[in-house]
Image (cartoon, rainbow, N blue to C red):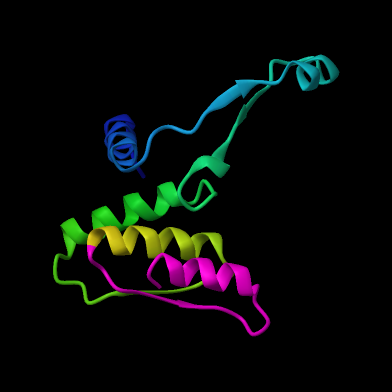
């Protein structure tokens, strides 16, 4: 479990790596739903997905707790793999991603492009 100081530390780390993604009020959806609606554009991260945040925090913590870790292996179809590959390259940790047969060629290429 984490607490507010841990959450704030994670936010500082993430904002050091890339700027906050934009969010905008969405008045038409708000009018239809009867509630205030804000849309956060996570497609503006380097990987195009919110999962990058988890990869950055995980890899940073791993490097601090186990500085000599030889690498990370994970199984995923795409966004999580891109997150780990990006964060691993940044932290100097080799990342191997296992994908299922028939996985999206575009997702595989994106994971490779980030270093997996």
Q: Residue at x 48, y 68 (%)?
A: 111
Number of numbered labels in the structure image: 0
Spot the residue most to the bottom. 101
Residue 30, image quadrant: top right
Q: Is residue 40 left or right of residue 73?
A: right
Task: Answer left or right for 64 relative to 78.
Answer: left
Quadrant in which the C terminus appears: bottom left
**Quadrant in the rendering for residue 91:** bottom left
| Residue at the image position 37 percent from the left and 70 percent from the top | 115
Residue 3 spot, x, y in % from top left: 32, 35
Tell me the residue at 28%/58% (across/down): 90
Camera-side residue of 44 and 66: 44
Residue 99, quarter of picture: bottom right
Image position, residue 9 (x, y; %) = 27, 36
- Could you tell whether 65 is left or right of 11 in the image? left
Q: Which residue extends farthest left? A: 67
Query: In this picture, which residue range is highlighted in magenta?
Result: 92-116
Quadrant where the N terminus lies?
top left
In this rendering, is residue 53 above or below 87? above
Determine if the magenta segment contains residue 7. no
Give the residue drawn at x 41%, y 64%: 114
Provide residue 5's location: percent of width, then percent of height.
27, 31
State the residue in front, 9 or 85.
85
Relative vertical location of residue 19 with respect to residue 29 in this rendering, above or below = below
């Amino acid at each position: 479990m984490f607490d507010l100081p841990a959450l704030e530390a994670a936010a500082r780390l993430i904002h050091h790596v890339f700027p906050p993604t934009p969010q905008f009020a969405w008045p038409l959806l708000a009018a239809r739903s009867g509630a205030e609606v804000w849309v956060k554009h996570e497609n503006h991260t380097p990987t195009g997905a919110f999962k990058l945040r988890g990869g950055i925090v995980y890899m940073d913590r791993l490097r601090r707790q186990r500085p000599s870790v030889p690498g990370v292996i994970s199984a995923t179809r795409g966004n999580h793999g891109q997150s780990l590959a990006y964060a691993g390259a940044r932290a100097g940790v080799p990342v191997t991603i296992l994908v299922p047969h028939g996985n999206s060629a575009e997702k595989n290429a994106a994971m490779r492009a980030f270093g997996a």
